[in-house]
Amino acid sequence: MTITSVRLGGTVITNPSAPFWPDEGLTKLDLAQFYARISSAVVPWMRSRAVTVERCPNGSRKPCVHGNQAPEHLPDSIPAVRIPMPSPGGVADCIVGGTRKTLLVLVNLGCVAMHVTHSRVDQFDRPDWISFDLDPVDGFGSAARVAPLLRAQLEDHGLEGYVKTSGGRGLHVLVPLRRGATEAQVRAYAVRIAGEVAARHPRLVTVESRLASRKAPVYLNVARNGSGQTIVTPFSVRRHPCAPVSMPLEWDEISPRLDPRIFTLRTAERRMAARSPWSSFFGHRQTLPRD
């Protein structure tokens, strides 16, 4: 008999046997159970933040639907808020993260990765982190070479960053901020820092968004600091082959020899049993420097 639904943590997971990663034998239920077990690690990164809904209801190999608008017919217990967006209409009613139930409802909708904004919905124009996306054209090793250079540049500005795998071939670096600077100010500062890194290391780093115009292997992308932009949370599963997980790292772990594919839905919990390298993140909010 085909099981059409499973109740998990008070949330109904429909079509639980859907093969989300068929080559790895991982189903929608495997994803839901993973997030249920690690919800205490993921939920703080989603709390009071708008969530972009990337729905992959037929698994990682099939097309996904990406959007800011919350789906219709959500349970009444799932909060949503209307926020400005750089899209047709200018606003969207977004799901607000922050509870285990919301997390599991998102999984049931077919969401694999959890994408959140860089600000909380009560002060949407006041980000509380800066993000940098190190996107290599030639593999993880190049991103691993650039990350310490970005770290050093941040330190020159009196800022401390935290690094994690993106869940793909790159790295993400986030800098926790005290709320105060506007979104425009935060984005401008990110652009400045990225430009300085690229100017110092032009053979390794580019800030050119057009792929055909890049002359260095690593694109240091700061676009995720823009209005309505999002980034995947730490411990998010990605829909790439093998179900990789975006994993927080210590800076001394960053090396071209590191294979980010070792962090997957099947292996991440062993790593997470130890103290997270990002455990101090929310207690280490920094003020954006003023010239």
Image (cartoon, grey):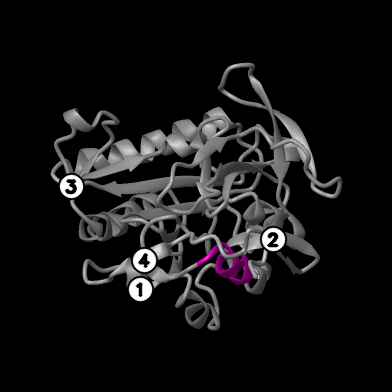
- Label 1 neighbourhood size at 10 Å, few (<14), some (14-19), many (20+)? some
Mark 2 neighbour density, 10 Å: few (under 14) some (14–19) many (20 or more): many
- Disc number placed over residue 204 in the picture, else none: 3
Q: Quick one: SS at disc 4? A: helix
> Looking at numbered disc 4 in the image, what kind of residue is underneath it?
Asp
In terms of sequence position, does the residue under pointer 2 or pointer 1 come before the other?
A: 2
Give the distance between the C-alpha atoms of the residues marked 3 and 4, in whole angstroms.
Answer: 35 Å
Q: CA distance from mark 1 to mark 4?
A: 17 Å
Mark 2 sits on what residue? Answer: 13
For the stretch drawn in magenta, the main secondary structure is helix
- Asked whether residue 86 is drawn in magenta, I would say no
- Place residue 215 in its image quadrant: top left
The quadrant holding residue 2 is bottom right
Decide which of 240, 252 is in the foreground and name it: 240
Q: Say left or right for 187 vs 99.
A: left
Image: magenta residue range: 27-35
Please give the name of the residue rendered at 41% of the width and 46% of the height, measured from the top-left corner.
132
Q: Amino acid at mark 2?
A: Ile
Helix, strand or loop at label 2? It is: strand
Measure the C-alpha gap from mark 2 to mark 4. Answer: 22 Å
Mark closer to the chain start, 3 or 4: 4
Q: Is residue 66 left or right of residue 194?
A: right
Disc sitting over residue 220 in the figure: none
Residue 3's spot in the image, x, y percent? 66, 67
Work out how far the residue at label 3 is from the one at label 2, CA to CA, in angstroms: 45 Å
